[in-house]
Amino acid sequence: MDGNFITLTIPQKKNIALIAHDSKKQEMIAWCAKHKEILQEHTLCGTGTTARMITDQTGLRVKGYNSGPLGGDQQIGAKIVEGRIDLVIFFSDPLTAQPHDPDVKALLRIAQVYDIPIANNKATADFLITSPYMREKYDHEVINFRRSIRERAQSL
């Protein structure tokens, strides 16, 4: 390793964010119910209404943040930066304009920056949830941000 990257570990018990646009909430609830046995092994959080509906309709414990349009997507993004989200399941609606689209794009971008697995539809979520990595640790490399900041500060 040359120091430009660091290795982070996604633990065996993952912190999973569950998010769904309004037209996809019932699909998300059905997906959570189908995969309840696996999901209950992990720590779950989500944006406001989605988290509440999943808890109410499946019995899974989902910590709720604000709803997406009220900053929930940004809260999830901040948790990724803090290293407190390991995986994101986000059932988005590509056919409906969202008033908080910039927040959604920022969330997707930060998940990419931190090399966080993210599913944007049911098929991808099915692949992720059934992966052997769901029940074991996973090491991945991300940019060494501290080094990058230090070098940038020295060059300015």
Image (cartoon, rainbow, N blue to C red):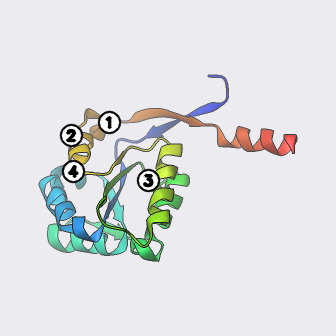
Q: Are marks 4 and 1 in contact (CB under 8 Å)?
A: no
Relative to residue 5, is residue 86 depicted above or below?
below
Label 3 is placed on what type of residue?
Ile
Relative to residue 129, is residue 84 depicted above or below?
below
Q: Nearer the viewer, mark 4 or mark 1?
A: 4
Label 2 is placed on what type of residue?
Thr
Residue 22 lies, in percent from the top left, at 27, 71
Q: Secondary structure at mark 2?
A: loop
Residue 153 lies, in percent from the top left, at 82, 45
Q: Residues within 10 Å of mark 3 (few under 14, many from 20)?
A: many
Q: Are marks 2 and 1 in contact (CB under 8 Å)?
A: no
Label 1 is placed on what type of residue?
Glu
Q: Which numbered disc, 2 or 4, marks the residue that appears first in the sequence?
A: 4
Q: Which numbered disc, 2 or 1, marks the residue that appears first in the sequence?
A: 2
In which quadrant is the N terminus drawn?
Answer: top right
Left or right of residue 147: residue 76:
left
Report the residue that reaches farthest toward the top: 1
Q: Which numbered disc, 2 or 3, marks the residue that appears first in the sequence?
A: 3
Q: Residues within 10 Å of mark 2 (few under 14, many from 20)?
A: few
For the residues labelled 2 and 4, the Cα–Cα distance comes to 12 Å
